[in-house]
Image (spheres, helix red, strand yellow):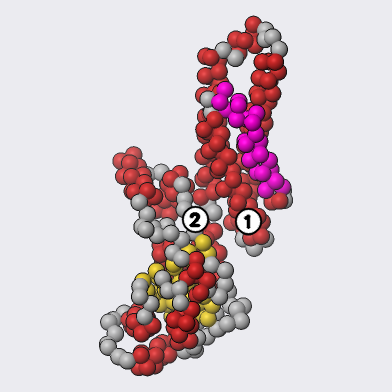
């Protein structure tokens, strides 16, 4: 099935969920809030569909994801059609004199039972959509690793920035990438520096040397530090992570980058920052912007990464969820 069709079906679902008829039937059956939540979830899924279409040919994981999504989207569409049918029936029934049997069907008790049943179905569909949407977070990891391993850049050193608000997981994602087995085998030298503020070129070079040697660097002038830096990276394929960068001044960035161009072709610099302006100053390619996860998506991702997808023991669930809530509700500013 063409992903453009999936995109269109998702659009139709959103349109139906926003229709006056569905909103009225949502109020009637007591599921208006659930329908609104479903609309928001489908909108988020639709937002990544076109990008997924581009990745499908090169990424089996994305292809498999689209196949799973297709089934859920069809189920969601069928469910919404059921609601649309109920809305039409109600319009007909209320526009004419209702028979005793019809009146009984639309009684408050039957309405409550039917609303509960349909509300449960909506929640089940939404849960499946949230779980599959959480899978898109793993695409971040794969896409960035693909960039790092690529060697078709015209420049000796390429720069990619990961952008997102504080507490969203930029540094954690960079650590996963830094420690990835493929990445470790690909680069001769791997370096990690926490930059923060201020953006001082001499201090950054000093920290790069300390990362390379694993020991504290002696106090030297910038020229001596540059010489030692050349010994470490010149002619070698290296990866450098510059974590928590705040500098928006292009001249300062260029003065640092000039010291880093000695690496062999395919060398990469990965920058983490909260500012899209910083990313545009530093990056040679389009920045990678991270978006936050909902509690359901975060729990799903937590189970996959921390527990390999296995359900934790009952005693661990409460603490695990409390931890995620704390992280989600109180991100760094």
Q: Which residue is mark 1?
A: 52
Q: Which residue is mark 2?
A: 291
Left/right placement of residue 64 relative to residue 250 reads right
**Tag 2 secondary structure:** loop
Q: Is residue 315 magenta?
A: no
The structure residue drawn at horizontal position 64% and vertical position 8%, both measured from the top left corner, is 101
Residue range in magenta is: 5-28
Left/right placement of residue 259 relative to residue 86 reads left
- Report, in whole angstroms, how far the alpha carbon at label 1 lies from the one at label 2: 16 Å
Left/right placement of residue 38 relative to residue 190 reads right
Viewer-closest of 247 and 112 = 247
Relative to residue 275, is residue 1 depicted above or below?
above
Viewer-closest of 294 and 67 = 294
Q: Quadrant of residue 60?
A: bottom right
Main structural element of the magenta stretch: helix, strand or loop? helix
Would residue 44 be seen by someone viewing this image from the given angle? yes
Q: Which is nearer the N-term, disc 1 or disc 2?
A: 1
- x and y, in percent, of residue 231 in the image: 41, 91
Picture quarter with the C terminus: bottom left
The mark closer to the camera, 1 or 2, is 2
Relative to residue 17, is residue 228 depicted above or below?
below
The structure residue drawn at horizontal position 64% and vertical position 31%, both measured from the top left corner, is 20
């Amino acid at each position: 099935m063409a992903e453009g069709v999936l995109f269109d079906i998702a659009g139709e679902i959103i349109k139906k969920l926003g229709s006056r008829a569905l909103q009225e039937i949502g109020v009637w059956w007591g599921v208006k809030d659930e329908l609104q939540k479903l609309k928001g979830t489908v909108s988020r899924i639709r937002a990544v569909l076109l990008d997924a279409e581009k990745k499908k040919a090169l990424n089996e994981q994305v292809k498999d994801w689209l196949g799973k999504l297709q089934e859920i989207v069809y189920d969601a569409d069928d469910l919404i059609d059921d609601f649309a049918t109920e809305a039409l029936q109600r319009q007909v029934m209320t526009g004419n004199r209702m028979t005793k049997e019809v009146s009984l069907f639309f009684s408050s008790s039957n309405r409550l039972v039917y609303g509960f049943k349909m509300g449960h179905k909506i929640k089940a569909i939404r849960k499946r959509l949230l779980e599959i949407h959480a899978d898109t977070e793993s695409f971040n990891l794969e896409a960035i690793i693909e960039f790092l391993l690529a060697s078709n850049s015209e420049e000796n050193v390429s720069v990619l920035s990961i952008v997102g608000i504080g507490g969203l997981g930029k540094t954690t994602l960079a650590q996963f990438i830094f420690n990835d087995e493929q990445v470790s085998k690909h680069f001769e030298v791997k370096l990690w520096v926490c930059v923060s503020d201020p953006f001082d070129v001499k201090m950054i070079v000093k920290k790069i040397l300390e990362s390379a040697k694993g020991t504290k660097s002696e106090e030297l002038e910038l020229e001596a530090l540059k010489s030692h830096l050349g010994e470490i990276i010149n002619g070698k394929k290296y990866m450098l992570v510059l974590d928590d960068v705040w500098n928006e001044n292009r001249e300062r960035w260029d003065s640092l980058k000039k010291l880093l161009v000695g690496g062999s072709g395919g060398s990469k610099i990965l920058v983490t920052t909260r500012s899209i302006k910083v990313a545009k100053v530093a990056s040679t390619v389009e920045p990678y912007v991270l978006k936050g996860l909902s509690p359901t998506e975060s729990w799903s991702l937590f189970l996959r990464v921390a527990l390999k997808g296995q359900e934790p023991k009952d005693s661990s669930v409460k603490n695990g969820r409390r931890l995620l809530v704390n992280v989600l509700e109180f991100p760094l500013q």
